[in-house]
Amino acid sequence: MKENDALCLFRGFSQNQIAKSLETASAQLTAANYTDTAIFSRTIPDTLLDTKVGEHIEALFNSDLSQKIKPEEENSGDSASSRGVLILTSDKQCLFKIMRGIKSVSENPQDIIFASVTETALTWTFRHYFSHLSEEHEYMKTHTPEGDPDMKAEKEK
């Protein structure tokens, strides 16, 4: 994986949904002249929920990310009621393009939890991170960002 590439970790999506999402996200990136950016993906099944995010990502970097997902990894787990995508990229605009691509082909896109992988998240387990993100997502669905600078969305350049 090169510095300008992106890694998407999916939870609660079928392989068909992931493939369609990545195709559309790639088209969004190409249209925005991100021609050297590749998107890699993996799923987060129930068996990985108690694994630290950083440890799993490090293991992925030590493997060949270009390989297809193994059959036993196909189901991204659905014990959690929500769908989520953790995105690792160094470019914020790239992150937004990927999110838009995934949302554009998803049923109920407002219910998808998107998060950039942060330094703090690397030290948490997937279970803890998804729990934290679910709480934030529920809060944001019922509160408006006006007057709260921490909740204002980043405006695209």
Image: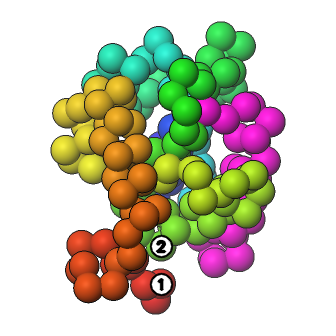
Q: Nearer the viewer, residue 60 or 51?
A: 51
Q: Contact (CB < 8 A) between labels 1 and 2?
A: yes
Q: Which residues are magenta?
A: 12-34
Among the two numbered marks 1 and 2 on one chain, the one whose residue lies closer to the N terminus: 2
Residue at image position (47%, 73%) is 93
Crowdedness of circle 1 by 10 Å Cα count: few (<14), some, many (20+)? few
Check residue 4 for magenta coloring: no
For mark 2, what is the residue? 93
Vertical position of residue 101 compared to residue 48: above or below: below
For mark 1, what is the residue? 156
Residue at image position (24%, 32%) is 124
Measured as percent of width and height from the top left, residue 113 is found at 50, 50
Residue at image position (46%, 62%) is 141
Q: What whole-number distance in Å separates the C-alpha atoms at marks 1 and 2? A: 7 Å
Under mark 1, the amino acid is Glu
In this rendering, would 30 be left or right of 135? right
Vertical position of residue 10 compared to residue 106: above or below: above
Q: Quick check: can you spot residue 68?
A: yes
Under mark 2, the amino acid is Gln
